[in-house]
Amino acid sequence: MGAMSDIPPTLPPVIPVTEPRMPEESPILGPGGRAPDLGTPTSRVVALVVVGVLYAVLALAQNLAPYLMPREGQVERKPRGGEVAKLLLLFEEAFRRGGLPSTGQFPSVAAGQFASSDLHPADQLQSVLVLGETDSPEAALGWLRAVRSGEDLETRLERRVLGEPTEEGPEKPATDAWAEVEGEDGPTVDPDAVADAETMEVLYSSGLGSLTTEQVARLRERYGWLGDLATTLPDSPERAALYDDIPWAVALILLVMVVFFVAGLGGLTMFIIAAVMFFGRRLERRFAPPLPGGSVFLETFGVFLAGFGLVHFGVGVLSGSIKDERTLLLIALSAQWVLLLTIFWPRLRGVTWRGWREAIGWYAPRGVWREVLAGVAGYFAGLPLLLAAMVFTVVLNMVVQALSSGPVEPPQNPMVELVANGDGLVIVLFLSLATVWAPIVEESLFRGGVYRHLRARFGAFVCAVLTALLFAFMHSYGPLLVGPLVALGFTFAMIREWRGSVIGAATAHCLHNSTIMVLMLVGLKAMG
């Protein structure tokens, strides 16, 4: 960093930092307690300015870019949401094959997710395919007429759930106004949605044999698994093969049940224990903040931000010459591993290996496994906070959508998109980043260096909130979805304060990401 030119050539000795209860681990102490970290007032000011500018630019780019990018064209857009409908119909078939009673709830939910006037016309038509498979051709045609006549689909769904009769719209609308979407020059009719509706009308009024080869190909190409289901004969081997993913769907149900049971029971138990110990003043804090001053760990965060920006800028430049998306993605994922080196910046500034480990928190005076178990316990204790943040996020998105003039489409979870579209090597690389790179690098930076630097001046709660916010907005989830990340960051910081070591926070981070990855992979396999 250019700011390092202000640092005098002769640097003060590095002061190793450990637990205040164990003076043998910290043989060199400054006047009145622990010495400040390495760095001068000038280097601290320069580092603060550089970090502030870089973080503002990167955080805004990460979170606002999806909103500022041109909206996807709505004309001839493929329908969305069929993967969830597939999963629900797999559940229904699994119940049927297992001889278990079914109330038809899964098909109702599958059809109901498309019963909204705010959805794209092609999305709404997916309910027609669901009803054609799970109910009858007549029910499918009734829903198709409702879509084409502009009927209130939400009201129709409520009547259907309650078993009330529904008033059918005209058999053929006078215009194709129902298929209007936003085009480049204003509202325009989506020709693909109109063609889809005409094909479905032939299918459910005259039968599969009345469809042309082109019409069959249209439904299969545009509607994926639902289109395949609608265009295969009952009791055919091709139809049976469409349900080959039932074991994955069942595995997902069982896995979710186990996760919710363990997380609910363990989280509530550990939260109560932590609360009792905290308010009973029996929860000993082992983090030892340094004296105010120094800049080396703030510099480390700045070096990481600079490297992060360079990696993304470099990938953007390469995208102009490398047209193969897979190759570009592999380069981007591999390059991120280089950022691991940035956490060792203090070593280049003269910090000893022992001093670096103790200051960042990569040490375990009571044993590594004790810190690992503390991380697991701390993660479970923080689950109620994570659940509250998730509920708040859902409510916030509902409020924003209710106040907006049209449907709000927040940025998609980048993890889901990446894993869903990647091949084996891409998935392995991404899993390694989520379960190894992130716990090491992000904990070394946010709960290690940045938390330590702030803790010299502020209390634990303030530092936990600040580092949680910094951590959350460095991810590209968008401002409406960062609530759970803030909760996680706060929990990890509290583990760091409690243990002194960062090993527990890294363990909790790894545990969370690993659980999400397993659920995601099994779910995507079932829905793929």
Image (cartoon, helix red, strand yellow):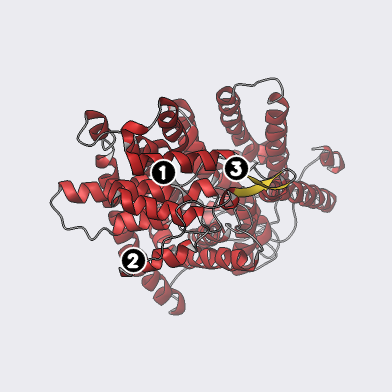
Give the quadrant of the C terminus. Answer: top left
**Quarter-of-image position of residue 406:** bottom right
Which residue is rendered at x = 15% and y = 48% of the image? 98
Looking at the rendered image, the disc whose residue lies closer to the viewer, 2 or 3, is 3
Kind of residue at badge 1: Glu
Q: CA distance from mark 1 to mark 3?
A: 17 Å
Q: Which residue is mark 3?
A: 190
Res 161 label: 2
Res 201 label: 1
- Residue 351, percent from left and from top: 66, 41
Q: CA distance from mark 2 to mark 3?
A: 30 Å
- Residue 51, percent from left and from top: 76, 49
Say whether residue 201 is visible. yes
Res 289 label: none
- Residue 255, percent from left and from top: 29, 50
Q: Secondary structure at mark 1?
A: helix
